[in-house]
Image (spheres, grey):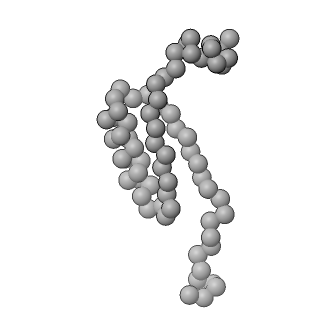
Amino acid sequence: MTEENKTPEPTQICSIRIGFPVTSDEQAIEYKKKLTEILSGIPNLRIEFSLSAIPTKAELNASGLIH
């Protein structure tokens, strides 16, 4: 392969953090599968997946986020 035809090396990484409510673990996993399918053509793709409870107002107050 000549220098003219060489694909440039990536110099940046794109990171997107998306949060949305779900009604079950299964629903969240289905969304993850759909996103993985959509992005599957991207080389070296890494998806970080996690579920967490929505914090209550009391928890938010304790952390100082709500006054």
Identify the residue at image location x=62%, y=70%. 9
Instruction: Name the residue furthest left.
Output: 26
Residue 6 image position (x, y, % from top left): 59, 80
Q: Is residue 15 left or right of residue 19?
A: right
Height in image: 44 above or below 9?
A: above
- Say which residue appears at 52% left-offset and 15% top-offset: 56
Q: From what the image shows, is residue 21 above or below residue 1?
A: above
Q: Residue sitting at 46 percent across and 29 percent down?
A: 52
Quick one: which residue is furthest to the bottom in this view?
A: 2
Q: Quadrant of the N terminus?
A: bottom right
Across and down, in percent, residue 17 comes to 55, 40
Q: Position of residue 31 (x, y in %)?
A: 38, 41
Of the pair 65 and 6, the residue shown nearer to us: 65
Question: In front: 45, or 5?
Answer: 45
The residue drawn where x is 46% and y is 38% is: 50
Q: Number of labelled discs?
A: 0
Query: Which quadrant of the view contains residue 39?
Result: bottom left
Q: Is residue 51 left or right of residue 66?
A: left
Pick the quarter of the image with the C terminus: top right
Q: Quadrant of residue 65?
A: top right
Seen in the picture, residue 41 relative to 49 is either above or below; the reply is below
Q: Is residue 60 above or below residue 20?
A: above
Question: Which of these two is toward me, 57 or 20?
Answer: 57
